[in-house]
Amino acid sequence: MFSDIQLAFITGLTSFLFTLFILSYLFGDNPVFQFAIHAFLGVSAGYIGVIIIQQVIYNKLLFPLVTGTFQTRLILVFPLVMSLMLLAKTSSSLEWLRRPVMALMVGVGAATIVAGAVIGTIFPQVLAAIGMFGLKDGVSNPQYAGSLVMGGITLLGTIVTLGYFQFQRGDQSKTPGSLNQIFGFIALLGQIFIAVTLGAIFAGVLLTVLTALSERVVSSLSFLESLFSFIH
Amino acid sequence: MAEFICPVCGKQNPAEAEFCENCGAELRKSRPESLPPANADQTAKNSTSPETSGSFSPYLPDWLNELSGRPLDEPSDQAENAESYQPSNFKDEWIDQSFKSGSEPGSEEPIPFEENTEDPVQAESFGEKSSPGDIPTGPDTLDQAENTAEEAFSGNNSWGLSAWLDRLQNSTPGSQTAPGSTRKLSPDSFENFLKDQESSGDFDTEKVNFPETLLPAKPDEDSSGLEELPDLSESEPQLESDQTAFDAELTPGQDFDSSAPFEDLSDRLPGLPEGKAEAAEEDSSSEPVEFPQPDVNSFADEIPEIPGGISIEKNGDSQETSTWIPELKNSPENRISEPVEQASSAMEPGSNDHQDLTPEPVDEQTIDSLLSMPNSEWIESLDQPETEENPATITDAQAEPANSLPQSELPSWVMAMRPSDILPEGQDAEKEIEEVGPLAGLHNILPTKQDKVEAYVPKSIHSSLSVTETQRVQAELMESILSNEKSPRFRRKNVKSSEIRWLRWVISIVLLSSMIIFAIFSPPFFQAPLTPTGSSPVGMTIKAIEAIPDSSPVLVVMDYQPDYIGEMESALGPVLNQLMSKHARLVFVSSTPMGGMLTEHLMQKLAGNFSYEAGKQYIYLGYLPGGSGGIFAFAKHPAYILGQGSTQENLWNKPVLKDYFKSGSDPQLSDFAAMVVSTDNADIGRTWIEQSGQKLGSKPMLMVVSAQSAPMLSPYIQSNQISGLVAGLEGGMIYNQAQKNKSTAGDYWDPFSAGVLATEILILIGAIWSLLASRRVPPSEIGQGEV
């Protein structure tokens, strides 16, 4: 129906226009910006819906339920019933039907996340933090000094960051002044480490945004260049 | 030979001996056979009568019953009385001692009224009622009347009392008892006695010394002896009236002056029949007889102190006695002895005087009870006029010479009990006298008056609160909080939209202009990043991919959003180029619905370079729903969770996979040569690491993430959970530099670098602007704005 050039032009033009529509937000909220937002949301939702219906409901539930074996059908009855129970949320009188299904989903999801976090994050990270001090390789490791420094910084950062969140404070009149100063210093170091961490995250977000903007700029310029080339 | 045992020393003496050969004590009184038969009969008659003797036992106090040595209600007879009089039956040794000390040979003289003191009962009964002293010898009838009356009153077993009374009487000069004399108690005998006395002229009133309390009270000075006593007439009107009637019959035509006692009696007998009372008054006032006043105090003082035994009160009244005597007299069993009592009353002007000599236990409690006895009533009676009811008596009493009788001396404790207005002359009343209340007239009763009351200034109570410092601070804090609540709250002043729009335009123009300029002209201003080392995340990724065998299946997770497509494709593109250069079988999965689209978009750019076709060199298994649970299930059973195409074909049977995964087998995650996770979300990348890391085994897990997720996933490189990390455009650019490949990353690098530079400049300018702005605005205005 469309040639590749035509298809590329239409895609490039649509991309360029929607980019301009989004950049129109410099003038504030305007209909062009709203149109671009609704277009993106609509297309995304439609696409997601189609994907879910096709790849989840039809491929994984309805088709096996019709064409599968008895065992497969018997097993698929449970997800089917629970899916219908979830639809009961639309009715206030039947809203209670979805609660067991939601409870099952939340429970299974929480258990999975907790187990994965403990096994896949906490224990390995603790072992890694200990390993930074070179206890395994010892002085024989040529990078022992650097590893030891990194381990010390990591440990210090961990301690002072936790110390910053020590919001429990006793009676000022009963707490010695020196102790208050120590806690204040720890909190200050914790603030520094937290600021560095948040700065790094903010820098990554900024780089991501600038990368996206650069991509849009380069794409728009490429479209215009192609357009001008086509005109000429 | 009959012998008689001395009651004092216990020695045997001849029966006819009058005094003890050993100690000299008088034996005739103690001898039972000395009692005359007639009198014994009379006494036996009276004593055996239940109305006279034994019947009094229930009404007697315990101490008297104990003294009698007989159980209550036991009928008495003369024999028992005689035996009870034996010294061996004395229960109190002090009485014996009193006998010893006072019974000296030759010291006893007969007394007129104790001629027949052989009758111990009569003698001791008289001793209770009458006072020993200079009583002239009178007729036997009077003694009989006295003794019989006392016997009837006190019972015939008051041997303990009679002993010391005998001693007292015997110690009185001229009180020698005529042996063998009998006593016959009858009104006539008493009358005859009075007549004989009058006729013989032996009845000298001056010689008859009755106790002061027995004599008519002197209205002007000494009437306390009578008036201090409790008023018994109200509780025993019948008894008193009968007594007065008997007195009226006893004394007509005689010179016996009993006006004062009768007057007092009539005053204290409001319920007395009028005829009898008048007769008694007339008789008593017709011819006054003055009895010699016995020295009560003298003989009372001679009485040894009785430890817990019997007490003799001279002018006071015993509370205990006053309670049991009315009961005794009001009992119907006592009716038969009323004449005897009347006779004794006739002899005792102070009808209550016999109680003064009534033995009673003396101890501190008794004295305390006496002192604490409610005496307001009888004290009030002192103030009442006595002459209203019996003016004749008053006249007679007033007619008495004031100094006809010597005054008796009251004990000190009795004097202390006396109201101040009746204190004897010469004794100054103390200043502090209770004027009101039940203790009116008494002194030294209550602490008094203003001079003993400590004056003090009452503590002023201030209306203001006294609070501690802590409470004050807390109150001030609460007050400040409340004041803040009352005051209008300010909010930060809104920044005008024009200012934001202006700043927005400036930033946009700076960024876009810089990017556009560097994108159009591409000046060699920004150099490409250095080649990564082997220990860098990108270098580790390159090494891991290089270690993958050729044409090995590699799982690629496409979990980024379309808005990050430029960055992710710039980072993922170089990785996929290296994999495709090794003819790796790319198996794409995604936990987001957009994964399929992104996969097709990326592969359209890259597949052309390596002749990759969908289903042959690469394949998209589909959307993996369920979040972390779906990822966990996929890591455990990849073929069961994904692999069903839109045409219901098994994607695992596609050519791209069938060479590695046999049909019908259960492929595992570890069967893939490597796993590349591309995501712009650190949480999704951590979920893949946590849920599928262990299932992957020793196979490398590579991460291609956006720049914003790199800081959160970098620690997993340190823990060796991931084998390499490519982050953002910079990572892709580094990867290209290492692979010496040209990709889209190089196209974005210059505008990206320009944009980063412009952003840094803007941040710096903004920081300086903010610093300067903060100095211009006073600190007091910071945070305040419009209402």
Image (tube, coloured by chain):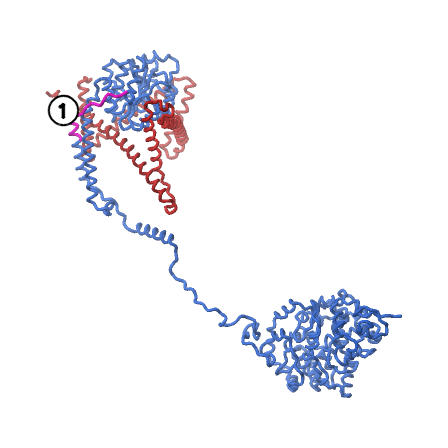
Residue B398 image point, x, y percent: 64, 85
Residue A146: quadrant of the picture: top left
Considering depth in this image, is B656 or B676 the residue closer to the camera?
Answer: B676
- Amino acid identity at mark 1: Phe
Instruction: Tell me if residue B489 can be seen.
Output: yes
Q: Judge whether A149 appears above or below B22 on screen.
A: above
* Position of residue A174 in the picture relative to residue B733 (left or right): right
Q: Judge whether B155 appears above or below B254 on screen.
A: above
Q: Residue at x 31, y 36 (%)?
A: A189
Residue A4 image point, x, y percent: 19, 17
Residue B328 lies in the magenta stretch: no
Q: Residue furthest left?
A: A232
Residue on which the image places disc 1: B521
Q: Residue at x 24, y 14 (%)?
A: B610
Residue B134 image point, x, y percent: 73, 81
Q: Which region shows up in magenta?
A: B511-533
Q: Chain B in the picture: what colour?
A: blue
Q: Residue at x 52, y 71 (%)?
A: B448
